[in-house]
Image (tube, rainbow, N blue to C red):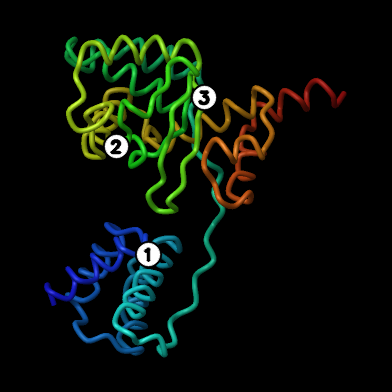
Amino acid sequence: MEENLNKFKNYLIVNGYSTLIYYTLMRYVLKEYPDLTETNICDFIIKKKEKNDSPSTLNTYIKAIKVYLKFINKTEFTLPKYFTEISKIPQFIMFEYLEKEIIKQLYIMFPRSRILKIKTLLYFMFYTGLRKIEIEMLKRENFNFRTREVKVFISKTKEERLIPLNEKMVRLLKRYFQTEKEVSSAFNLNKDGINHIFKVLKRELENPILHPHTFRHGFAMHLQRNGFTTREIMSLLGHKNISTTMRYENADINLIKEKFNRNIK
């Protein structure tokens, strides 16, 4: 099984799939069912559903199994239908919360030697909306301080996009880059390193929604509050489908209430 899984992992990499997710899930599935059949695939999904796995998680299992069956040339199988996922309102933080509640308290949560690095990272995540994997892949050569922009490469789609940087962000990046040489990436952090920072933030600030994606959502809402169109937000976030971006249109209830109170008498 192990040899076949390693071949599957290479297949995922070559074909641009979500390598870690599908590889990990199939390792779990095949441990229970080494020989996949239509019956035991259904049994597996039913067991996961009975354990109250979310529709999103169940759909990811189904998609991983579908990709694996394609890899082993068993595409004739009839798989369970995808589950209807709940369209949740994105959880986000406001810029004011970032500055007043997070940045100001970094000194009591982290060693002083790490403050500039973490401060720069958090502002960068909020002002760009980049995903953890995109930050991990960034090199300092991707930054152009003269034109105030950063080039992001999306390995999954083999596409590049440019994201503008404001003056404040450029000043912080220049200052941080002068204090630490690039070793593995622009911030010398992988996904685990970023997760650890947010684990500390969540614990110390007692805020369960603090997560890298909360910053990404915060960036989208910050753009919306400052008059950016859905198409412009879509471009900056790197979404392929505008329906994904449209989730943010009615997510800020406070903005809606402000407009309601101004106009509805």
- Above or below, 81 against 168 in this view is below
Circle 1: element type: loop
Estimate the spatial distance between the alpha carbons at disc 3 and disc 2, rounded to whole Å: 19 Å
Question: As rendered, which of 252 and 239 lies closer to the eye?
Answer: 239
- Judging by the rendered image, the residue that carries numbered circle 2 is 136
Binning the other alpha carbons within 10 Å of mark 1 as few (below 14), some (14 to 19) or many (20 upward) gives few
Circle 2: element type: helix
- Judging by the rendered image, the residue that carries numbered circle 1 is 52
Give the residue displayed 22% in from the left and 39% down from the top.
192
Estimate the spatial distance between the alpha carbons at disc 1 and disc 3, rounded to whole Å: 42 Å
The three-letter amino acid code for the residue at tag 3 is: Pro
Q: Which mark is residue 114?
A: none
- Judging by the rendered image, the residue that carries numbered circle 3 is 164
The picture quadrant where one finds residue 252 is top right
The three-letter amino acid code for the residue at tag 2 is: Glu
**Residue 182, x across and y down, in percent:** 21, 24
**Residue 10, x across and y down, in percent:** 24, 65
